[in-house]
Image (cartoon, helix red, strand yellow):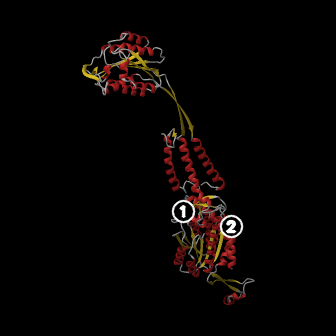
Amino acid sequence: MTTKDILKKVRKIEIKTKRLSDHIFGGEYHSSFKGRGMTFSEVRPYAFGDDVRNIDWNVTARYRTPFIKVFEEERELTMLLAVDISASQWFGTRGQLKREMITEIVATLAFSATQNNDKVGLVLYSDEIELFIPPQKGRSHVLRIIRELVDLKPKDTQTNTAKALKFVYNILKKKAIVFLISDFIDQNYEDTLKIVGKKHDLTGVMVYDPMEKEMPDLGLITIKDLETGQAAFVDTSNSKVRRTHNAHFLKRHNYFKKAFQKAGSGIIWVPTNGSYIKKMLQYFNARN
Amino acid sequence: MKNIFGHTQFETPYALLLLLLVPILAIWLYKNRYNERAKFLYSNLAAFGNFKTLKNKIIPVLAGFLLLSIALISVGIARPRSVDVTAKTKKTKGIDIMLAVDVSASMLARDLKPNRLEALKKTAIDFIKKRPNDRFGVVLYAGEAFTQVPITSDHRIVMQAIRKINFRQLFNQLDQGTAIGMGLATAVNRLKDSKAKSKVIILMTDGVNNTGEIDPNTALELAKEFGIKVYTIGLGTNGYAPTPVGVRPDGSFRYQNAKVEIDENLLKKIAQETGGKYFRATDNQKLDKIYKAIDKLEKTEIKETKYYNYKELYRPFVLSAVLLIFLVGILRYTWLKSFV
C-alpha cells in the first residue's frame, strides 16, 4: 500500500466513523464513562428551569439578579485501545475482514473519545507488543492511530492476549478506559484479565466471522492456518467435523464471556456481517 | 527384452524407465501435498479437531491410484506383447550326396586308427548326422562296384548301412582290386535321375585304379555330363603303412609295410573338372577336417519362415489406468467435492 492509498483509506474510515461518533455515539459514550467529579467552571444568569440549588448567592447579591453556578464534569479520561493484529485477523467471509471491522471500531471509539476531550492511546499486539502509541488528544492523533492500524505489518503472526494485558497493566498508572479488541482465538488470559479488570474500566470486544462459528459443507478442502501456517486436509462435509468446529467456537466464546464477566468487565461480540454500532449502542445503554 | 513375464516381451522396454518416475513423484507429491493447491486460509485450524474421516483417509489412496495409473501407462507404452512363434521350415530340397567308398583290402591298412575303413565309417556317419536336409546314398566298390543304399532321405538306413560295412563279407563277395572308374560310374548312375539342385559324389579311395570295366576318365565324363560335383578323398599316410598282404590259413590277415600309392593326379583331375575338390587324409583328424570342409562347401539353403503372432497386451494396462484416472476425477468432483 502506498502512502496515498493509506491516507485515502484513513480518510474513508474517518468520514464513516466520525459521523457515527458525532451523531450516534458521542452522547452515549460520554455518559457511559463518567469523570471523577464536578468542578466549578463559571456563573451565568439564571434561566427558567435551572436548579435553584445551584444559585450562587454571593454573585446574585452583588448584581441583584439571580446567577447560577455552572459545573462541568471533570473528564480528561484516558482511553487505551488494545488491538489484536495477529494473522488470524486477516479472515472474513462476509464483505469485510475482521481486521477491517476492528479498524472501524477503533476509529469510532477514538473519535468519540477525542470529541469528549479524552486522551486515546493504542496498543497493537500479536505474539509480541507490536506498537504502543501513548494516550494523547486531538484529531491528528486519532488519524495517526487509524493509519497505524491500516498500515502496520505485524512481525509475529500468533496471538498472546495475556502478554498484551500485562503490558497494558504496566503502562497505565491511572485508571483508564481499556478496550481489548480481538477475535480471542487464544487461551489462558483469564487470570491476567482479572488483574487488569480490577484496576481499569475494561471492555472486551470480540470480532468473529460467521464461518468461524459454523462451517458450511465445502467438501474436502485444504485449510491453512493463518497464524501457525500449518496445513491439513479437512473434510467439511463430515457433520462430526463441523460439529467439533462449532463446539470449539462456542467453547472459545464462552471462555471469553466468562473471563470478562469474572473480571467485572463488559463484553461486546460482533460478527463481521453484523452491525457493531448497534451492539456498541446496546452496550453503552446497558451501562447507563 | 524377452521373457520377463514368460512369453511376454516389450517392444520398447526403455519406456519402463518411466517407472522410476513413480517413486520420485510419490515423494514429491507427499512433500508438496499441501502446496500447489488452492488453500483455504483460515483463522483457526485447531478448531476442526484431529479427525481422520473416510475422505481424509482416501486422499493418499487417490494419489496412489494416480501413481499406479502412471505406472500402468508406462508399462503400456513399453508395449508388452506375447509372442507366438510358429516356425514353418520350408525344406528346400537338399542336395543329393553319394558316398562312394573304396572297400578294397588296402582299406584295412592301419595308418588311420583303427584302420582306414573304420575311421571312414565313423566320420561319414557324423557327416550325415550334420546334414539333415540332404539325401544320401552309398556305393561300395573294390574290383567292382555296387550300390549299398540308393539315394534316400532316410538317414537312419544310410547310417545303419555304413555301420554294417563288413570288410570280410565284402572280401568274399567282390572282386579284388580298386576300380575307381566303376565306383564313380555307379554313383553317377544313381544320381543321374536325381532332381536335386546340387548333386555331389564323395569319392574315397586309397589306391590306384587298377581294374574295372569303366575307365575313371569315362566315369568323369559321365559325371560332368550330369552336372555332378565330385569331391575326392585320398586316404592314407605319406610313405609306408601296415597293409594286409595275404591271408593266413586261419583267415586272419598278414600285414606288411607297403608303400601307400594313391593316384592323386587322377583324383585331382576328377575333382577339378567336376567343380569339386581333392583332399588328402593322412590321419583321422585330417579326415574329420575334410568332411567338415565339404560340409561347409556344400551349404544347403534352408528357408525357414517364422510367423510371429504378436498379441498386444497394452490394452488392459492402459484401460485400467484410464479407469483409475476417471475414478479419481469423478470422486474428486462429486463425492469429495475437492481439488485435492
The residue drawn where x is 70% and y is 70% is A278
Please report, as a chain letter, where disc 2 is located. Answer: A
Between residues B99 and A154, which one lies in front from this camera angle? B99
The residue drawn where x is 66% and y is 54% is B334
- Determine which residue is flagged by label 1: A230
Q: Residues within 10 Å of mark 2 (few under 14, many from 20)?
A: some
The residue drawn where x is 45% and y is 27% is B156
Q: Secondary structure at mark 1?
A: loop
Task: Using residue A122 as the reference point, say whether residue A23 is left or right of it.
Answer: right
- Horizontal and vertical percent position of residue A203: 62, 76
- Which labelled disc corresponds to residue B280? none
- Horizontal and vertical percent position of residue A3: 55, 59
Could you tell me if residue B185 is visible in this image? yes
Task: Using residue B92 as the reference point, say whether residue B104 is left or right of it.
Answer: left
- Which labelled disc corresponds to residue A274? 2
Quarter of the figure with the C terminus of chain B: bottom right
Q: CA distance from mark 2 to mark 1?
A: 29 Å
For the residue marked with disc 1, what is the amino acid? Gln
Please report, as a chain letter, where disc 1 is located. Answer: A
Between residues A57 and A150, which one lies in front from this camera angle? A150
Between residues A249 and A237, which one lies in front from this camera angle? A237
